[in-house]
Image (tube, rainbow, N blue to C red):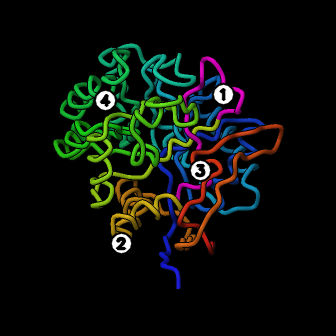
Amino acid sequence: MPKEITLCSPLDMHLHLRDGDMMKLVTPLTAETFSGAVIMPNLVPPVDSLELLLAYKKRILSSLGGHQFDPYMMLFFRGDYTEAELAAAKEYMLGIKLYPAGATTNSEAGVKAIDAVEPVFKMMEEMGIPLMVHGETHGFVMDREKEFLASYDYLAQKFPKLQITMEHITTADAVALLDEHENLRATVTLQHLIITLDDVAGGMLDPHLFCKPIAKRPEDREALLQAALEGHPRLMFGSDSAPHPVEKKECCGCAAGVFTAPLAIARLAQLFDKHDKLDNLQAFISDNAQRLYGVEPAEKLVTVANVPFEVPTAYTGHDQHVVPMHAGETLDWNVTSIKA
């Protein structure tokens, strides 16, 4: 009999669904196996008002393909939010996402100076609204996250009741900082638990592994992996699954993003099993997020077993063509049952 594990209500705490035809293709690929996900607001234009948030959520719900799924919405951080705006939006969102201007896809409208928007942080702290952050500077690409850690340290100390999520951490230094402040938590992606920069550019360039923050050194991957495997209580799975049309990936000026949504649960099970830590996967993929954010997803029981899974070379539909991580490879684990 194959080894198996049943996960209760998996959550993806960092997900890109895009919009339009791409959203129609990729949304069911997450909604099938996850109970809910935190939806990134960096559309064009950004989702920076309650009106835009509610309209986007409506479009997501219409794209679920019949699956049971809760989209946890976020606003795109603006430095001029009023208390009235935040109060009106609070019940409809999980938090607010801060992007440094120009740091990643569709972030040109982001924040240029952290200290210039502190009044909004203060309002969020007083109102109990979590802050999620894409934590990179514009320095040398391998040092951008490390350089931003000083900003996390500053914010965590100045606003001790503000719950701050360090999104998609990639370094050993970020793991260490997580233990220094009780109001810090973090998400980590599938790819950053598996690859290093060598996998992206050490031989022939692999555009489908190129993402931001960029993959780092082996010692960084090891620190992230150990924190996840040991069930760090303030570390959560956030796929940062970021679909781009194949022509935007296999080109000069390759778009940043790794598409992992359809295989994330199977690949995580394979990874945790390899290290004899399957018992800690439930905390990483759901329990920690439920406790930290106070969310109560609908029950969805997802059974994953030690049986082969041939990853498609691409996912197509709605005039879209997206290549996933591990395209054309055979994984050792697969989702075998879903009960919602």
Q: Residues within 10 Å of mark 1 (few under 14, many from 20)?
A: some
Q: Secondary structure at mark 2?
A: helix
Q: Residue at x 60, y 23 (%)?
A: 254
Q: Residues within 10 Å of mark 4 (few under 14, many from 20)?
A: some
> Disc 3 to disc 1, how far (Cα)?
19 Å
Q: Which residue is mark 2?
A: 279
> Disc 4 to disc 3, how far (Cα)?
35 Å
Q: Nearer the viewer, mark 4 or mark 2?
A: 2
Identify which amino acid the numbered label 4 is placed on. Lys
Q: Is residue 250 magenta?
A: yes
Circles 4, 2 touching at the beta carbon (< 8 Å): no
In primary-sequence order, the first of circles 3 and 1 is: 1
Q: Which residue is mark 3?
A: 261
Q: Which residue is mark 4?
A: 122
> Disc 2 to disc 1, how far (Cα)?
38 Å
> Disc 3 to disc 2, how far (Cα)?
22 Å
Extreme-bottom residue of the structure: 1
Q: Residue at x 43, y 52 (%)?
A: 237
Q: Nearer the viewer, mark 2 or mark 1?
A: 1
> Disc 1 to disc 4, how far (Cα)?
43 Å
Side of 74 where 154 appears, left or right? left
In primary-sequence order, the first of circles 3 and 2 is: 3
Circles 4, 3 touching at the beta carbon (< 8 Å): no
Q: Secondary structure at mark 4?
A: helix
- Residue 162: x and y in percent read 29, 39
Residue numbers of the magenta segment: 244-265
